[in-house]
Amino acid sequence: MADKQAHLNGAYYGPSVPPAANYNRPSRRSGCGCGCCLLKLLLKIIISLVVIIGLAVLIFWLIFRPKEVKFHVTDVQLSEFTLDNSTLRYNLAVNITVRNPNKRIGIHYDRIEARAYYEDQRLQSVPLTPFYQGHKNTSFLNPVFTGEQFVRLGSGEVADYNEERISGVYSIDVKLYLRIRFKVGRVRTSRFRPRIECDLKVPLNSANAAPFTTKRCDWDY
């Protein structure tokens, strides 16, 4: 009876309620996932490769100090250059010197093709013998162009030809198409395909013709 009275007089509201469990919602990861990580990794690899290649090129240049190979046309012989009914007959011999000024770099000329042009019309292509050029060495090329070629010349170009025929000096372009490799020690580079352009003023062989002066050729990649 006393127990009942105690329960009635006390503040009893039923069984105690257990504390609420803490529920932590999984947080979303920052960033864009695996794809973004791969992109960042690829970017780091590319930047590292660029830096390594740049340093290698700088070290190569500091050690070997490469210099440009020089091409000069030293002499030409033009014994015939006659235009008749759009057919051009020609006989041209060209002497070209090739100077490699480098002390530690050799050059393999795997392919050499000489071409002659008049008014942007190709007259003839002449293959030359491949060769290796050593350090600080001068080599000689002697292409000969002879024959006849049909050319399409406008009225202005024909007028230019007639003026050059009177003066005895013709504007003829000789170009060298190369396939070369550089040799440094025992290492050989991959092939390069440069073009050498020689814009010439060629006198016809005659007593009144002005002598030919040496002409430096230009590189074109």
Image (cartoon, rainbow, N blue to C red):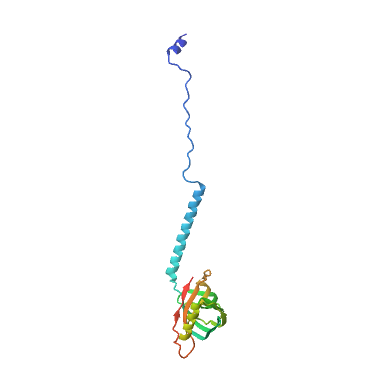
Q: Is residue 10 above or below residue 50?
A: above
Name, please, the residue furthest toward the bottom.
207
Name, please, the residue furthest toward the top.
1
Q: Residue at x 46, y 60 (%)?
A: 50
Return the x and y of residue 55 as percentages of the image width and height.
Answer: 44, 63
Name, please, the residue furthest toward the front.
155
Q: Is residue 145 above or below residue 53?
A: below
Pick whichever, 163 or 45, lies toward us: 163
Return the x and y of residue 187 as percentages of the image width and height.
Answer: 52, 70
Q: Is residue 47 visible?
A: yes
Q: Residue at x 49, y 52 (%)?
A: 39
Q: Residue at x 45, y 80 (%)?
A: 215
Total of numbered circles in the picture? Answer: 0
Q: Residue at x 50, y 46 (%)?
A: 33
Residue 128, quarter of the rendered image? bottom right
Q: Is residue 114 visible?
A: no
**Residue 149 shown left or right of residue 65 in the figure:** right
Q: Is residue 76 above or below residue 37?
A: below
Return the x and y of residue 41 as percentages of the image width and height.
Answer: 49, 53
